[in-house]
Every structure is written in C-alpha cells, then in structure tokens.
Image: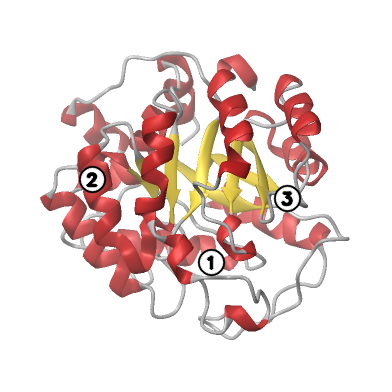
Amino acid sequence: MGGKMFKKFRIVTSLSLLLLLCSITTSGFGQTGIQYLGPIIDMHLHAYTNEDFIGPAPNPTTGEMSVDNATEHRRQTVEVLKNNNIVLSMVDGESPEAVDAWEEILGDGVIRGLRFENPEEDLDLNLFTEWVEEGKIEVFGEVGATYAGFSSADSVLDPFLQISEEFNIAVGIHTGGSYPGIHRVNPDFRLRYGDPFLVEDILVTHPNLRVYLMHSGSHFYERTAMLMVQYPNLYSDIAILNWYTNAEVFLIQFLKLAKQYNVLDRVMFGTDQMIWPEAIEMAIAKVQSLDFLTLEEKAGIFYMNAARFLNLSDETIAEHHEQE
C-alpha cells in the first residue's frame, strides 16, 4: 500500500456526487430512515495471533460466545468486511506479524496498525523505527497507554510520536473509558488518563502529526468536540460507541454535539470489534438507524471523512466506489 495510500488528493465535496454513491431505503434489520449504501472505511479493527488471542468470551451486548482462535476470528471478520462493502480497514496488532495474514487476504484493503499499552515494556524505539521504515506500520495505534497507567502525553511516548510525524504515520489514541471493572484486570488503568484534553499538548508539540481520538472520548465526548473545534486537523472515530451495550448515550450525544459544532466532517466510522466479528454489522446498523443524520453526513462518517484523513487519491476513491 504505502505511497498509494497516502497520496495527496482533492477531496470531493459535491452533494450530487455523494448522492450517486448512496441510496435511500427504509428496510433492514434495526435500521430506519435514510440508508447509506456506498463503500465503508473502518478505522478501528483488531488482529491477533493464536498466541495473543484473548477469547473465547461472550459478546458484551448479545451474550453470544466468540470463537477461540485467531485464525477463525480472522476468517469470520474478513467475511463480514466483504459482505458489507468495507473496502478499507485500519487493522492493528501487537506486532506486524498479526496483520500480515490480513494483508495477504485483503491486500490494499488493509491499513497496517500497531497496538500497544505499556510504552516502557511493549515498545522498542529502534524496532519501531525499523518497522516504520520498512512500511510495516502505517498507523501508530491503538495507543492504549491509559490501560498501563500512562497519560497519552507522557514524555515516554514522545520519541515514537516524533518518528510518526517524520514519516507521516497517523496516530490513533485511545480516549475515554473501558468496560466496568477493568481495574481488576488492569490495576494501573485510570479513567482520568482517557481524558482527550491530555492529547492537547501532542497537537501543539507535533503540529504536523495526523491524530485521531479513538472512541471520540466516550465519557469525555464534550471535550472531544471542544478539541476538534480548537484544532481543525484533529479527527475522531466512533468505534465501540456504536455497538457496545450502554454506549449509545455517548454516541448520540457526541454526534449531535459534533453536528452543532460543525465538526461532524472529521468524525470517522470505526468498530473496535475486538474478538466479535458480528460487532461490525451491529455498528453499521446503529449508524444507519440515526435519523438525525442526513445522507451526506452518513456518507461522510462511513467513508469520506476517513478518505480525507488518510489522504486518499481521487483514483483510489473512484476504485473504492467501483467495488460496490
């Protein structure tokens, strides 16, 4: 993918074109009103190896048990991606090897991410630099330092951010909370480290760094919207807010606020399917069901906003729409 993925492009904003890429329907399970039927970019998916797979476990929303290995998880997830016209996915793993198998199947449909939690134990700067130079990392994220008791603005992360800025590597930072009781598994987790305001110093210190706030801050969604007003280059994703039990309150309030603040054009679709591939379709259905969003706004969330963030070329955008 590499240079093809991040070529400069002239963003298409014409409503008439967007309407050609979408259709209107009132059918579909759990979906009402205007439906977007164009290509989708998912900015938040996870890959595993059989060694670091965290299942099986029940889906927190449906109660259905997950598969018990990374191979079947990958097979099912890829099938869901293809069935739902998801043409491009940011897939992260704890190592590049976890993403390799996805790229072998999906080719240019994969953006390679690197997931980590503890910056003192999980990352080696020299190895990180080597992976970036070799094109094995295209997004530095999910940066989940809050799970290990670190602020995303902790100085220990700065060398990695400098490398990311130098090589034009986008950064996806976990913001907001996690599931209730996370401290029993991750005793260093602190909700306060998920405050999006902690990212502000990064935005100032690294003005050319492309950053998006994963989960749009969830519990702190108002602060995410404030930051997006103040920093015009800042984006966010709505991963997990669109399918996880009891998270809808954050999703709806954030999207309405983003719309009111005129920053909705920087909100991107994401899933955070973790070990439950079915969460992808649940997340799509939730966004489709939001009747306060126009067709153009849904097209932005599902595709165009991420295309802008990723600097996709006109040619790549056209190719994605030809895949419908």
Q: Amino acid at mark 3?
A: Glu
Q: In the rendered view, tell whether residue 34 sits above or below residue 308.
A: below
Of badges 2 and 1, the one in the foreground is: 2
Label 2 environment density (alpha carbons within 10 Å; few <14, some 14–19, many ≥20): many
Instruction: Name the residue furthest left.
Output: 260
* Residue denoted by label 1: 279
* Residue denoted by label 2: 264
Label 1 environment density (alpha carbons within 10 Å; few <14, some 14–19, many ≥20): many
Q: Amino acid at mark 1?
A: Ala
Q: Residues under labels 2 and 3: Cα distance?
A: 35 Å
Q: Residues under labels 2 and 1: Cα distance?
A: 23 Å
Question: Which of pointers 2 and 1 lies earlier in the amino acid sequence?
Answer: 2
Q: Residue at x 18, y 59 (%)?
A: 256
Discs 2, 1 touching: Cβ within 8 Å? no
Label 3 environment density (alpha carbons within 10 Å; few <14, some 14–19, many ≥20): few
* Residue denoted by label 3: 120
Dot label at residue 260: none
Taking depth in this image into account, of 35 and 261 the one nearest to the observer is 261
Q: Amino acid at mark 2?
A: Leu
Taking depth in this image into account, of 232 and 305 the one nearest to the observer is 232
Q: Is residue 235 visible?
A: yes
Q: Is residue 280 left or right of residue 258?
A: right
Of badges 2 and 3, the one in the foreground is: 3
The percent coordinates of residue 198 (x first, y second) are 40, 51
State the image quarter where residue 14 is shown. top left
The percent coordinates of residue 298 (x first, y second) are 27, 48
Q: Residue at x 66, y 74 (%)?
A: 186
The percent coordinates of residue 225 (x first, y second) are 24, 51
Query: In what element is the residue under mark 1?
Result: helix
The percent coordinates of residue 149 (x first, y second) are 60, 64
Quarter of the image where the N terminus is located:
top right
